[in-house]
Amino acid sequence: MIARGTMVESATKITRNGASCSLWLIAVFCLAAGCAQTEPRDPDVIVVALRSAPNNLNPLLANDEFSSRVAQLVFSSLMDLGDDLRPQPTLADRIESPDPKTHIVHLKRGVRFHDGRELTAEDVVYTYRLLLDPAFVSPYKSAYRNLASVAAIDKYSVVFRLTEPSVAFDVQLTTPPVIPAGSVDTLSRAPIGTGPYRFERYDVETQVVLSAFDGYFRGAPDNKGMILKIIPDDTMRGLELRKRSVDIVVNQMPPDIVHRFEERHEIQVTRQPGMDLSYIGFNMRDPVVSDVRVRRAISHAIDREAIVTHLRRGLATVAVGVLPPQVWAAEPNVRQYEFNPARAKQLLDEAGYSDPDGDGPLPRLHLSLKVGNTEEVILQATVVQQDLYRVGIALDVRSYEFATMFADVVNGNFQLSSLQWVGGALGDPDILRRVFHSAQVPPNGFNRGRYVNPAVDRLLDLASASIEEGERRRYYSAAQKLIADDAPYIPIWHRTHAVIGQPYLTGLHINPAGNYESLRDVRRVGE
């Protein structure tokens, strides 16, 4: 538990005043000068810091950010999201759709797996038939609930047949990555893909070592390899950047440290628009937060502008909904929950949670929030805690190691939770169905809050089945308005990417989806 006290006061000072007084931040810049250099390494192998270890190296089983980062470097999908967030061919050469329920994927020829074998239709069929297997559990299965069959036409062509029309099937093909036929049981130990890097080894909880794959179908990387170095502590990631034992950190550093690096001009910091979403989710089966008035009150009580401006140092934009504004189906004209403590108190009164002692210390009600254990996440939670305290809600913030916390959320063992959606999943408006449709409760999908609204279900079903983009937009728009009214999520912010790299590197960039594949363009040009 995080008590309301010194830590909350410290977090609030940072949020309201922008002061950088944390001991870990001071340590980064006061201790680094005296740190010795690490042992020599190949300068053309790029070291990238990760906050946490991957949960699974099999990309079909990966359900966390860090596993997906490894997969983006080792594997490839049939399609990718471009900088405009529209699907573009990757392993696919082109897609034909003779009718809205039939999609034929013609593969690029000459694409090689890391073991030298050519990718063919057999591998694609094997990958997608796993998602049709009732015994196979994968977080990607819910995206293919309308897939009836997949079959090879010839060595380089695959036909996907759907149970209902879908003109947006090419977006679905951005995940999962294609794996070699027959490999599902070995990938967790020895992943083999068609991506820009070949897996060498995983030193558990320490680093993932990758070497450049010269046979990559998009062209060999501009460096010799990647070491994904696992550094859970924010302070140590900053120190290792200062020591130059880490070359790059992408979105894995607290905003205060990013801001300090920008001020000192010793290291490159590139800001780029992103999509990642920070949100608070409610368990709709909980007797307290199942009341929409309570959810709306909490939404009005949180000062999201202050979080973005001061705590995030501008490395985010306030989120209106789940979909980022860059996505074609995002609806901006939904119910807005502006910071309004007076309205929050009024809603709590209407819900029957009156203030027992006026302006005194006794709370109206007690709630609990589960979060991960990184400093950045905890700091934001303490700010939310203080905001709710001002309207009479005593929030018990409970911090856990991420895997433990995530398992609780998936199993519905929470009242409120704070998580992030990461990367390209938010580029496809079908994420709304996977998160808010009543049929998508885990393990079938991502409706972890057990939200149920038959009208939303109907609109999302219609959007999925529609073959005309304008019609789909109308359905998605109407669904987003209903979802905002019900407030099963409190969207907090969409990330602004912060790519931090050493001054001797070129090619530092990342697309809005945050795909690490673009790191293949990084190379060293000197010291």
Image: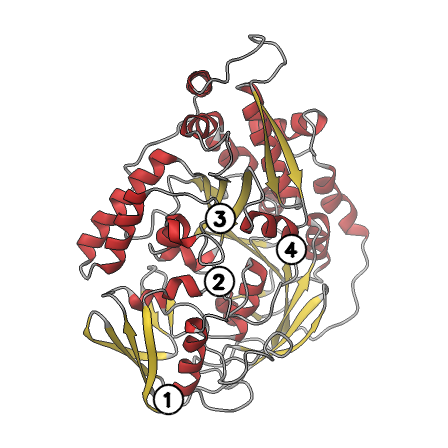
Q: CA distance from mark 4 to mark 2?
A: 22 Å
Could you say whether the residue bearing mark 2 is in a helix, strand or loop? loop
Residue at 60% across, 33% down: 368
Could you say whether the residue bearing mark 4 is in a helix, strand or loop? loop
Q: Label 3 amino acid?
A: Arg
Viewer-nearest of discs 3 and 4: 3
Do the residues under discs 2 and 1 have CB atoms within 8 angstroms? no
Residue at 66% across, 46% down: 374
Viewer-nearest of discs 4 and 2: 2
Could you say whether the residue bearing mark 3 is in a helix, strand or loop? loop
The residue beneath circle 3 is 448
The residue beneath circle 1 is 109
Please rate how many residues cluster around mark 3, counting C-alpha atoms within 10 Å: few if below 14, some from 14 to 19, many from 20: many
Q: CA distance from mark 1 to mark 4?
A: 37 Å
- Which is more N-terminal, label 4 or label 1? 4
Viewer-nearest of discs 1 and 3: 3
Q: What percent of the width, then of the height, locates residue 105?
A: 30, 79
Q: What percent of the width, then of the height, locates residue 251?
A: 55, 53
The residue beneath circle 4 is 51
Q: CA distance from mark 1 to mark 3?
A: 40 Å
- Which is more N-terminal, label 2 or label 4? 4
Q: CA distance from mark 3 to mark 4?
A: 24 Å
- Which is more N-terminal, label 1 or label 2? 1
Indicate which disc residue 139 carries: 2
Q: What percent of the width, then of the height, locates residue 493?
A: 46, 41
Q: Label 2 amino acid?
A: Pro
Residue 338 occupies quadrant: top left
